Image (cartoon, coloured by chain):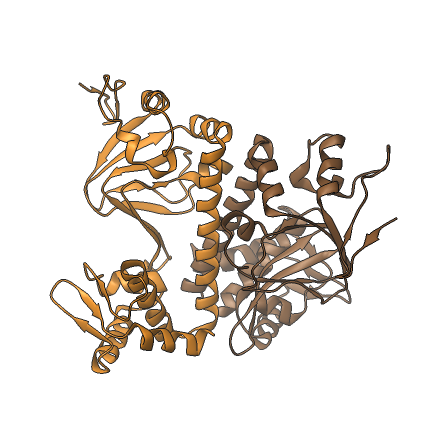
Chain colours: A orange, B brown
Amino acid sequence: MLNTRADGEARRPAPAGGERSLLSNIKLFEGLSAGQLTALEVASRYRRFSAHETIIERDSVSTDVFFLVRGSARVVNYSLSGKEITFDDLHEGQFFGELSALDGRPRSATVIATEDSLIVSLKARVFLDLVLETPPLAQRLLLRLAGMVRAADDRIMDLSTLAAINRVQAELLRQARAEGGDRNAAVIEPIPTHSDFASRVSTTRETVARVLNDLARQGIVERKRDALMIHDMQKLKQMVEDVRG
Amino acid sequence: MLNTRADGEARRPAPAGGERSLLSNIKLFEGLSAGQLTALEVASRYRRFSAHETIIERDSVSTDVFFLVRGSARVVNYSLSGKEITFDDLHEGQFFGELSALDGRPRSATVIATEDSLIVSLKARVFLDLVLETPPLAQRLLLRLAGMVRAADDRIMDLSTLAAINRVQAELLRQARAEGGDRNAAVIEPIPTHSDFASRVSTTRETVARVLNDLARQGIVERKRDALMIHDMQKLKQMVEDVRG
């Protein structure tokens, strides 16, 4: 079926009538016709990555846009001393690599597969032409970038004004909200490792462990085998608001 | 000439033939025809702000986009304790307020006029319709947002991995580059105040003073009445690279 190339990449033949496009679960492309998706697929490459394999290397010069058809990935950077700073966790249906596609500059971050993943890529020119001639796509891409700016600005505020223990509490609240909505209890599962958690708020594993232990002692969180239970969202929210305003 | 309204805002009549549009120096709108600019002006409001006056209040609910026709403005946030964090300095020809126009969420930051300024505003709907039906504008807005994401991510890295004194050195290098290009000497003028400088890298005035004094003692910078001279960009660059990689 596949014309496998020497470098391990493959071009996929256009799907036969009735076959579902690989790109049909990409949220950015919602609303495109089957014909448009097929045309995109013909222009795309796809490649499998194993968990922990690097998809994009920071500072490398390339401008393709990548679509996470299956699997998950993490956007990270490393300090000179090897400290890992996590920028985002990406899931099935999302995309990445759009910054270099837009501005032609080297990659701003490293992207690593966190599970075995299937990634479809498009050349920057193909991606940009499509986006600019399809207003709903342009609007979605603008919204995505606006969301990235807001999230980054919030993080800058937290890094600039909060102590590490408060940043851990704030991140816990953020993850609980992403999972659970607005009730007073929430479940975060699977449990993020202490080092994943630390990498998201730029602190150490030891600080994360200390904060979680403190919160457990107060009955606000409870660690189960596979999940972190939040028993008192209200109290956690109050702790964060007391320092963040 | 102006139909001044009770709230101090004004609608401007369409410019007569030959009159230059207020919006003609807005870089985002480069390439629009005189007729398109006139149509935009008819849909716009404009208002003067004095230096230090607030243009947008963080968390307020409004979605207009603002264009800096004359003057300058600063994008800031304040911590609960009153610490000021500067996100951006905006100059004539730039715009702001696009995040809320795109996503309808409350304002992410406060914007304050730093000089007497003339600001033209457009309703979100008018702005978005124009952007989405004019690919070169959509592309410029995408580029602007991509630049904001890159700058914010760099700042997150610096805040996460550099000591305050190194962040001051890095900001000095950034400002010198913005002024001067790649030669070994550069001039930053006017001199930013220590508190402006501190607010851009989330540290204290005292730390900024200490770093500048240290650099002056080493002959790397020199403070003149109205300007900060950088005598050895290469050395400064090396100091930053030694810690940032």
Q: Estimate the x, y position of residue A239 in percent, counting from the top left.
A: 37, 78
Residue visible at 51% across and 60% down in the picture: B239
- Residue A230 vs A104, above or below: the answer is below
Image-based side of B109 in relation to A177, left or right:
right
In the rendered image, residue B228, in percent from the top left (x then y), is placed at 70, 62
Q: How many marks?
A: 0
Q: Is residue B94 visible?
A: yes
Left or right for A235, reference B185:
left
For the question of whether residue B241 can be seen, the reply is no
Residue displayed at 33% across by 67% down: A173
Question: Residue sitting at 52 percent across and 59 percent down?
Answer: B106
Farthest left residue in view? A225
Q: At 18% across and 73% down in the image, what residue appears?
A: A222
Q: Nearer the viewer, residue A59 or B107?
A: B107
Q: Residue B53 appears in which quarter of the rendering?
A: bottom right
Q: Residue furthest bottom?
A: A218
* Residue A145 vertical position relative to residue B76 in the rendered view, above or below: above
Say left or right for B90 vs A225: right
Please determine whether, in this image, residue B157 is positioned above or below residue B30: below
Q: Quadrant of residue B174?
A: bottom right
Quadrant housing the N terminus of chain A? top left
Residue B78: percent from the left, percent from the top? 55, 71
In percent of width and height, residue A32 lies at 38, 28
Residue farthest toward the right in the current orientation of the protein:
B1
